[in-house]
Image (tube, grey):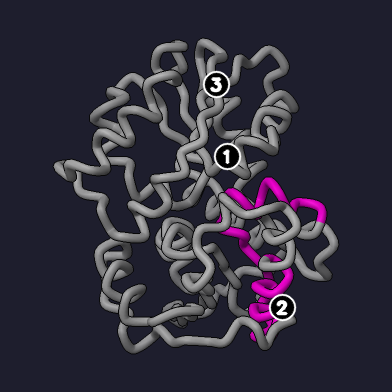
């Protein structure tokens, strides 16, 4: 048994979809979350900048002696994969768990991918999917506006800005007959109610945050690292901009008040 916390990071609010799933699947685990809200979004940055941010984010989480690092960011998972592999402690991103889940879920072999510009340009999801389903047909769509909409907490099914944006991004995926869609950014699962209405019940949605949490649970179980004490897991949240903005949106996305658990940190100290 290992009582050390799980470290989770993202460019902003998106990674809370991973936190929400970890809390459900692993209720005894402590979580340290860092949202780089001062530099969100990552998906429009250069690869060099993304890797620099990633190194700082990881260094901050390592200061808590985390037993595992969860990269709850599609952009980092696809752009900084080699950097993540060099970590001296167990780690995972959303890439492999989500790609494997999609390859197993699709019936017609047509898989859509929604991600940031950096994620889509990397082609990483397509390559990873073909490791599990060689003949898969991939339709990839960059959805840069969606990160900002989630960060603004414009996630309601009746939102008159988010709905047309999601519909426009989904159009080529649905026109190509995809029966499975990877939400390749952890911001996007927060939009599942909207995506579900537009895509229809027959299309399978791969929640990248949930798939990452499932992988974490399996890894901890298989390696004797799960916290099996009766302790109820606690989460602490850190951001690189005003905590109040983050806490307000997180209350909606997590369904709980985190005002007393959210703090500002100067990420530039972790270089």
- Which residues are drawn in magenta? 54-82
Q: In the rendered image, is residue 81 in sight?
A: yes
Task: Return the residue nearer the eye: 255 or 126.
Answer: 126
Queried whether the magenta region covers residue 40, the answer comes back as no
Which image quadrant for residue 241?
A: bottom left
Helix, strand or loop at disc 1? helix
Q: Contact (CB < 8 A) between labels 3 and 1?
A: no
Q: Which label was assigned to residue 139?
A: 3
From the image, tell me which residue sits under label 2.
59
Camera-nearest label, 3 or 1 = 3
Task: Return the residue nearer the eye: 55 or 65.
Answer: 55
Q: Earlier in the sequence, mark 2 or mark 1?
A: 2
Farthest residue to the left: give it. Answer: 158
| Quadrant position of the N terminus in the picture | bottom right
Q: How many callouts does the rendering have?
A: 3
Q: Earlier in the sequence, mark 3 or mark 2?
A: 2
From the image, tell me which residue sits under label 1.
98
Residue appearing at x 27%, y 27% in the figure: 198
Q: Position of residue 250 (x, y in %)?
A: 32, 68
Helix, strand or loop at disc 2? helix
How far apart marks 2 and 1 lie (CA) works out to 25 Å
How far apart marks 3 and 2 lie (CA) works out to 35 Å
Residue appearing at x 34%, y 28% in the figure: 168
Q: Position of residue 201 (x, y in %)?
A: 29, 24
Q: Residues within 10 Å of mark 3 (few under 14, many from 20)?
A: some
């Amino acid at each position: 048994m290992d009582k050390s916390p799980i470290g989770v990071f993202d460019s902003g609010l998106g990674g809370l979809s991973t936190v929400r799933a970890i809390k459900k699947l692993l209720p005894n685990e402590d979580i340290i979350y860092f949202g780089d809200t001062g530099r969100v979004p990552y998906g429009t940055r250069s690869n060099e900048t993304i890797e620099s941010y990633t190194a700082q984010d990881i260094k901050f989480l390592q200061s808590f002696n985390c037993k595992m690092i969860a990269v709850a960011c599609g952009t980092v998972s696809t752009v900084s994969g080699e950097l993540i592999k060099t970590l001296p402690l167990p780690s995972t991103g959303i890439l492999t768990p989500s790609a494997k889940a999609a390859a197993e879920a699709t019936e017609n072999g047509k898989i859509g991918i929604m991600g940031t510009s950096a994620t889509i340009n990397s082609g990483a999801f397509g390559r990873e999917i073909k490791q599990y389903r060689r003949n898969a047909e991939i339709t990839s769509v960059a959805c840069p506006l969606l990160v900002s909409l989630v960060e603004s907490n414009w996630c309601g099914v009746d939102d008159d800005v988010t709905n047309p944006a999601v519909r426009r991004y989904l159009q080529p995926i649905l026109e190509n007959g995809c029966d499975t869609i990877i939400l390749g950014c952890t911001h996007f699962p927060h939009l599942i109610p909207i995506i579900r209405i537009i895509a229809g019940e027959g299309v399978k949605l791969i929640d990248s945050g949930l798939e990452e949490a499932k992988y974490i649970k399996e890894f901890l179980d298989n390696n004797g690292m799960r916290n099996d004490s009766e302790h109820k897991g606690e989460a602490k949240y850190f951001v690189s901009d005003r905590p109040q903005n983050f806490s307000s949106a997180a209350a909606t996305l997590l369904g709980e008040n985190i005002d007393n658990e959210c703090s500002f940190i100067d990420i530039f100290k972790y270089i």
